Image (cartoon, rainbow, N blue to C red):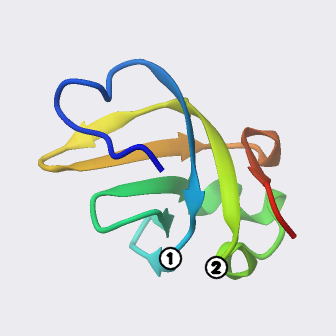
Amino acid sequence: FQDLNQDNYQGWKRVTGRILAVKHAAKSIYLQFSDRVAVQVDKQYAALFPPLKNYAGKNVEARGWVYQSKDRFALPVRHPGEIKVIDP
């Protein structure tokens, strides 16, 4: 995937890459492309998606607005239509 940085993260993006890990936080579940870039699914929307652990190891395309928090970037998704598996 194209790594995001301070200069290129702003605005609506289409981010593709392999999900390396699925991490749970208090309010969200993160599908990690790397230590710095992740797809963020709020737990309130998680029931709309297939089991999120199934995304681990798959190539996906996520679409939406990218946000920065410190040195990390997150692309929040609220609907399964915003993320798709590129390979089975």
Q: Position of residue 81 (x, y in %)?
A: 82, 40
Mark 1 or mark 2: name the one nearer the start of the chain: 1
Q: Which amino acid, by three-letter code, is at mark 2?
A: Gly
Seen from the viewer's position, the closer of residues 42 and 75 is 75
Seen from the viewer's position, the closer of residues 41 and 10 is 10
Q: Position of residue 40 (x, y in %)?
A: 50, 54
Q: Tell me which residue sits at (46%, 63%) in the image.
A: 33
Check the image and name the residue furthest to the top.
Answer: 11
Q: Which amino acid, by three-letter code, is at mark 1?
A: Leu
Q: Are marks 1 and 2 in contact (CB under 8 Å)?
A: yes
**In the image, residue 36 above or below residue 23:** above
- Judging from the image, what secondary structure is the residue with disc 2 in? loop
Check disc 2 and report the residue beneath it.
57
Residue 20's disc number: 1
Q: CA distance from mark 1 to mark 2?
A: 6 Å
Q: Is residue 85 left or right of residue 14?
A: right
Seen from the viewer's position, the closer of residues 60 and 64 is 60
Q: Is residue 3 left or right of residue 65?
A: left
